[in-house]
Image (spheres, rainbow, N blue to C red):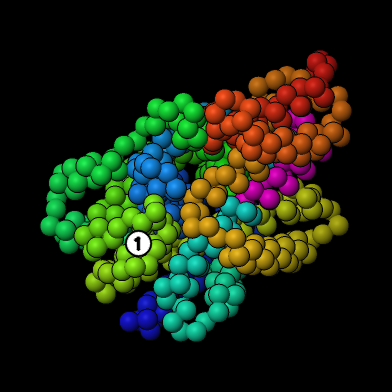
Amino acid sequence: MVSWLLCIVVCYFLLLLAVAYRTSRHSNNDSFFIGNRSSNWMLVAFGMIGTSLSGVTFISVPGTVGNYGGGMQPAAFGYFQVVIGYLVGYFIIAYILLPLYYRLNLTSIYHYLQSRLGNSSYKTGALFFILSRTVGATARLYLVIHVLQLFLLDSLGIPFVVTTLIILGMILLYTLEGGVKTIVWTDTLQTTFMLVGLVVGVVYILHSLHLDLGQAWTSMKGLGYTKIFNTDIRSPSFFVKQILGGAAITVTMTGLDQEMMQKNISVKTLKDSQKNMLTFSVVMALVTGLFLVLGGLLYLYAFNQGAVYQSHVLTLNGKPVLPDALFPSMAIHHFSPVFSIIFIIGLISALFPSADGAMTALTSSFCIDLLNLKERTDMDERKRRRTRMTVHGCFALVFLCCILIFHQVDKGSTIKMILDLATYTYGPLLGLFAFGIFTRRALKYPQFSPVVCLASPVLCYFISTYSKAWLGGYQVGIELLVINGLITFLGLLLLSEKQRA
């Protein structure tokens, strides 16, 4: 069985290479950075689903449904509160940020900060993106590699570091030439396989439990798994916090993120790019909702197999099952061999979009924003291409180091870790863009904007750590991202003056 699954992984990669070869012919630096602004908006919208969901949604979101996390109540469908916020955020991106990017004809969205707030803010914004996307992408990639290692490759005696090297080498190989031009197509392919795995998983469990969807929903409701809104204002998952935080996360992790916007601005017109964003937002909400349903069904199936909670930890056959391990554990050890194959295909389809676009966008941002590659008059196209490939290879090494660090600190729920990290690293970006868009003031001391952007996350750490003691039991949750952006905004305001006519 293991050899069959390994063959599927190899065949899947060969398919990606074939797509990469076909799409990267006659490519140049513009193909790599923005796909020559000729991408089809429907393909971009569909492929972005896979990029946004990634392995985190495929594995970690279903596990959150019954994750007690040390408390007395399950998380249930509470994650959908964040998804509602996502929808709000996508509308903000479509009608505020995208018109701005298209009007300025940007290749890197951080060039806006240069024209509006000066070179220091521009470089700071680009650096915070590079930090944020590197951390987020490697956390997502680590999760899927960890699952492949745990349930497939450990039995073959392949070390974790070797698995990571091979997968990063694969990603490097098929993104090296085509960049965005290739990724638009590979992400479409990978999203298709991921969604097939999701739908087949739901159907398989319903059939195995001899339930229709209505009966399954009643069973999940009886366990409290269908609850969405948390009305406890002191809780970190209070619904207003979650919706507000979800909107801020979308604006920052999509609208202020070079990886996601790089694909959007590769679409020919603003109108098509907006259609892409709105279509994507609706489909994204529906798919995430289905992943939560899958999570509830997985817990029903686990209980049917004899799983119980012991000290708030799900235990099956005497062994603890962490939230992130629930879906792979059921799929590989308890479902039929046919579904195990479908799961592995879905899993590796979730693996690549979480890293290929990120590595490409990080390369683009580093080359354009920090090395000023497009403006260098001392370099011809050939030298630019060689520099871009060198940077691309260096980011693969950075990814390797970050994944190995995550392997040492893994606590079992990657989705929470990513959202927590995002509140610190994306906050300054939110503050920079908000100040630039919503005020007409100029920075009197632009050289100090990096200090403000570094101080804000530090202050937010203390607010998060001591909010319960300082605020009478109130715990800061995902809304910390908004607080972080607000502190950055206020700091920039102190450095500003009325713009001269």
The residue located at (33%, 55%) in the rendering is 309
| Residue at the far front in the pictured view | 311
Q: Is residue 35 above or below residue 92?
A: below
- Circle 1 residues within 10 Å: few <14, some 14–19, many ≥20: some
Residue 142 rendering spot, x and y as whole percentages? 54, 63
User: Looking at the rendering, which quadrant does residue 392 occupy?
Assistant: bottom right
Residue 240 seen anywhere in this rendered image of the structure = no
Amino acid at the residue labelled 1: Thr
Residue 245 seen anywhere in this rendered image of the structure = yes
- Is residue 399 found left or right of 288 in the rendered image? right
The one of 324 and 368 positioned closer to us in this rendering: 324
- Residue designated by label 1: 315
The residue located at (62%, 51%) in the rendering is 133
Residue 2 rendering spot, x and y as whole percentages? 37, 81
Q: Is residue 195 above or below residue 224?
A: below
- Is residue 479 found left or right of 307 in the rendered image? right
Residue 374 rendering spot, x and y as whole percentages? 75, 51
The quadrant of the rendering that contains the C terminus is top right
Number of marks drawn: 1
- Magenta segment main secondary structure: helix
* Mark 1 residue element: strand
The residue located at (33%, 82%) in the rendering is 1
Q: Is residue 65 above or below residue 478?
A: below
Find the magenta span and give its range. 114-133
- Is residue 119 found left or right of 233 in the rendered image? right
Q: Is residue 117 one of those drawn in magenta?
A: yes
Q: Is residue 109 one of those drawn in magenta?
A: no
The residue located at (37%, 77%) in the rendering is 5
Residue 231 rendering spot, x and y as whole percentages? 40, 27
The one of 75 and 355 positioned closer to us in this rendering: 75
